Image: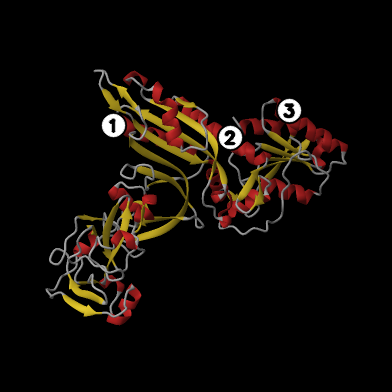
């Protein structure tokens, strides 16, 4: 490729503000172009990197017998795959089977300052495996995880695997691939004393059992006092001394959830507990309460609360006396104790972790880091929502099929490579994913000897199947050096004054040193580096 013909010019700066450096660099390097807020076009160099990432992923998947299919993109992936293959999986002899698909996906929510990380559309590779039983499903989960590990290692990016929320089948296991990054939107809690590491939405924490002094329950007149902040001021107490009771609609059921006043309800944990999709959980309306539950909005409490299932956060069972709503207008109760004054139908962990919480495994302090998720693996469990999705075992009896789904967001993976591998001058691409492996810069295109030598090098490298781009533009030397740096091509060969002696300047993008080499020696060095 000749740079004079290349679509996608570099730029010194971009007007948009982004949360992380990689997004600016991807626009400045001419790999992506902003069309409108949250919408991006991929230019030729970006397309080359995307193709390389997809090729790396596809090769590893196909080694493990994953097969590529094309399915409609306007239907949920898992459902589309099952509908496509249900008639091909009728016998135990047909299993296991694994497929993958590459397509452009539309994102429902965008965040402009996250650039292509949260763009309106993005490229993703998705996979699905079908299995005979639960153990085979668990093995399949580990297999796909290992495939992705191999890819991440090849491209030189450190990725951590953390437990996550399963939005397809909440009760089943799910893990995300996270790249730590200061500007990332995912919060990760890490223990300082052990290997505990988990995303905020599923993070557990140590609960300290408090000494409980025996004090009688007592009503308190709280006229017009409904919020926790108002109660703190009115009763001169802290939020952690309160227990708030939340009435929610989970699917078709109205439930009451009791958590400590200084905690936030974790809908991810509640969804997993109830095996109800998170989008089907919401605050209860007045119509859900009126005439069915004996309480008063703003003064709801767990004591003598009837007509509803009560779920109690486990921390409530270990705390001392608490202030709760009295289920009576303008009244609260103090000195309320779990087990003595009320019990839950279910006790579970349904609250969010806080920054000062201790590790649930060893009790040590936890720190919070930020990261970007680039992919996810989910156990689907038994596939029960697709008609005729079953096979016959060796005895001829019908059995359910189990599934494992996964995806890699290619735009995010590409972004994180840049985020982790750049310097003040631009991108530093690893050889495996660089848009081109070598860039040849002719410093003075008016000098015939430089042009001839540059083109000779270019043609010889192309003849050796090496991906090379020739900067043949009539630009000043500084502009060519700057563009070579921001583009991040791994190997740079500069053709300058030494051309008359068949000598060139040779430099690797990640090193500061440059050296003068003869043309043949430079060619040999390139071939050795790219073996």
Asked if marks 1 and 2 touch (Cβ < 8 Å), the reply is no
Across and down, in percent, residue 121 comes to: 57, 45
Q: Tell me what residue is drawn at x 30 percent, y 68 percent.
A: 297
Front in this rendered view, residue 231 or 65: 231
Q: Is residue 172 above or below residue 90?
A: below
Front in this rendered view, residue 177 or 504: 177
Q: Can residue 358 be seen in this view?
A: no
- Name the colouring of the figure: secondary structure
Residue with the mark numbered 1:
135
The answer to whether residue 529 is left or right of residue 291 is right
Location of the N terminus by quadrant is top right
Pointer 1: residues within 10 angstroms few (<14), some, or many (20+)?
few
Task: Give how far apart the Cα atoms at labels 3 and 2 are.
Answer: 23 Å
Q: Which of the marked residues, 1 or 3, is nearer the chain's N terminus?
A: 1
Pointer 2: residues within 10 angstroms few (<14), some, or many (20+)?
some
Mark 1 vs mark 3, foreground winner is: 1
Q: Which of the marked residues, 3 or 2, is nearer the chain's N terminus?
A: 2
Q: Residue 417 carries which label?
A: none
Across and down, in percent, residue 357 comes to: 31, 63
The answer to whether residue 361 is left or right of residue 471 is left
Tally of numbered discs: 3
Front in this rendered view, residue 473 or 170: 170
Mark 3 vs mark 2, foreground winner is: 2
Residue with the mark numbered 2:
52
Query: Tag 1, which secondary structure?
Result: helix
Q: Tell me what residue is drawn at x 34 percent, y 65 percent.
A: 356
- Of all residues, the one furthest to the front in this rendering is 291
Across and down, in percent, residue 509 comes to: 64, 45
Task: Give how far apart the Cα atoms at labels 1 and 2 are.
Answer: 34 Å
Query: Tag 3, which secondary structure?
Result: helix
């Amino acid at each position: 490729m000749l740079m004079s013909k290349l679509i996608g010019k570099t730029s010194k700066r971009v007007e948009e503000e982004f949360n992380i450096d990689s997004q600016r660099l991807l626009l400045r390097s001419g790999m992506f172009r902003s069309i409108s807020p949250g919408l991006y076009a991929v230019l030729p160099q970006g397309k080359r990197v995307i193709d390389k990432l997809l090729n790396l992923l596809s090769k590893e998947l196909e080694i493990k017998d994953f097969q590529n299919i094309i399915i409609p993109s306007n239907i949920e992936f898992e459902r589309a795959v099952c509908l496509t293959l249900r008639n091909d999986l009728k016998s135990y002899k047909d299993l296991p089977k694994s497929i993958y698909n590459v397509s452009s996906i539309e994102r429902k929510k965008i965040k402009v300052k996250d650039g292509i990380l949260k763009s309106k559309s993005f490229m993703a590779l998705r996979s699905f495996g079908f299995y005979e039983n639960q153990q085979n499903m668990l093995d399949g989960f580990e297999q796909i995880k290992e495939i992705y590990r191999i890819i991440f290692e090849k491209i030189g990016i450190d990725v951590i695997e953390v437990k996550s929320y399963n939005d397809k089948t909440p009760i089943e296991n799910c893990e995300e691939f996270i790249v730590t990054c200061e500007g990332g939107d995912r919060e990760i809690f890490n223990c300082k004393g052990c290997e505990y590491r988990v995303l905020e939405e599923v993070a557990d924490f140590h609960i300290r059992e408090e000494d409980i002094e025996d004090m009688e329950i007592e009503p308190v007149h709280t006229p017009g006092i409904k919020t926790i902040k108002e109660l703190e001021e009115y009763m001169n107490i802290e939020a952690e001394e309160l227990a708030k009771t939340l009435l929610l609609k989970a699917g078709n059921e109205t439930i009451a959830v009791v958590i400590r006043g200084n905690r936030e309800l974790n809908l991810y944990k509640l969804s997993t507990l109830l095996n109800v999709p998170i989008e089907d959980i919401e605050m209860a309306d007045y119509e859900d309460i009126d005439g069915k539950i004996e309480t008063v909005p703003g003064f709801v409490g767990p004591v003598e609360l009837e007509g509803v299932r009560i779920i109690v956060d486990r921390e409530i069972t270990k705390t001392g006396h608490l202030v709760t709503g009295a289920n009576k207008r303008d009244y609260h109760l103090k000195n309320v104790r779990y087990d003595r004054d009320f019990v839950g139908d279910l006790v579970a962990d349904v609250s969010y972790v806080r920054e000062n919480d201790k590790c649930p495994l060893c009790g040590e302090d936890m720190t919070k880091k930020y990261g970007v998720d680039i992919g996810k693996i989910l156990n689907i469990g038994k596939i029960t929502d697709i008609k005729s999705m079953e096979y016959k075992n060796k005895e001829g009896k019908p059995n359910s099929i189990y599934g494992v789904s996964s995806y890699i967001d290619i735009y995010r993976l590409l972004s994180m490579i840049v985020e982790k591998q750049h310097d003040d001058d631009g991108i530093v691409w690893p050889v495996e994913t660089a848009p081109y492996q070598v860039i040849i810069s002719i410093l003075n295109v008016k000098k015939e000897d430089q042009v001839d030598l540059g083109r000779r090098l270019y043609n010889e490298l192309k003849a050796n199947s090496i991906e090379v781009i020739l900067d043949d533009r009539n630009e000043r030397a500084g502009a060519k050096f700057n563009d070579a740096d921001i583009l991040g091509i791994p190997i740079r060969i500069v053709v300058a004054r030494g051309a008359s002696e068949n000598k060139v300047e040779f430099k690797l993008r990640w090193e500061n040193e440059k050296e003068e080499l003869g043309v043949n020696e430079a060619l040999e060095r390139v071939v050795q580096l790219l073996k």
